[in-house]
Amino acid sequence: MTTDSYTKTEIPLCAIDDLEDRCAMELVIEERQLFAIRMDDKIFAYWNLCPHRSSPLNWVPNQFLDVENQLIQCALHGALFEIDSGLCVAGPCSGDHLQSVELRCEDQFYYVAANQQMPAAPVNLRAQALADLEDKE
Ligand code: FES
């Protein structure tokens, strides 16, 4: 069984002016979380999964940067990532990359590109446990 999924259509994200410099926004596509950060006059986006433990990077909505607003920081163990490349430059997954989200920009408006691979959907442990209980009855 393959777990690969792809974005089916292009999805509007935001206009460049909707985000202040070094600010982020989140979006959910088919249960997968992504976040986008503006740096100068460009927006970069990544699936919200830390390469260390595949957990979300943030605890606070739309908060992804370190205190200096220079690097993306994982809230769980503190890994630091470059905003423009997703490269982990410090922490337990140093040298790994965030999984980038391909964007398309037209007239200063950004879209999540269609036909790109998405990470596996998160497992709903509660629903799975309930289904297991029903199977046993
Ligand atoms: S889960 Fe991100 S650094 Fe450990």
Image (cartoon, helix red, strand yellow):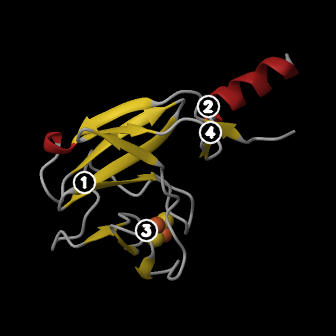
Q: Residue at x 49, y 64 (%)?
A: 98
* Separation of marks 4 and 1 at Cα, in angstroms: 22 Å
For the C terminus, the quadrant is top right
Cα–Cα span, label 3 and label 4: 21 Å
Choose top left, top right, bottom left or bottom right for residue 136. Answer: top right
Q: Earlier in the sequence, mark 2 or mark 4?
A: 4
Among all residues in the image, which is located at the extreme front? Answer: 107
Badge 4 amino acid: Ala
Label 3, secondary structure: give it. Answer: loop
Q: Which mark is residue 63?
A: 1
Instruction: Point out residue 102 in the picture as x, y percentages from the top left corner.
Output: 48, 49
Mark pair 1, 3: CA separation: 16 Å
Q: Secondary structure at mark 2?
A: helix
Q: Amino acid at mark 3?
A: Gly
- The amino acid type, in three-letter code, at marker 1 is Gln
Classify 10 Å Cα crowding around label 1: few (below 14), some (14-19), many (20 and above): some
Residue under pointer 2? 126
Q: CA distance from mark 1 to mark 2?
A: 27 Å
Q: CA distance from mark 2 to mark 4?
A: 15 Å
Residue hosting label 3: 86
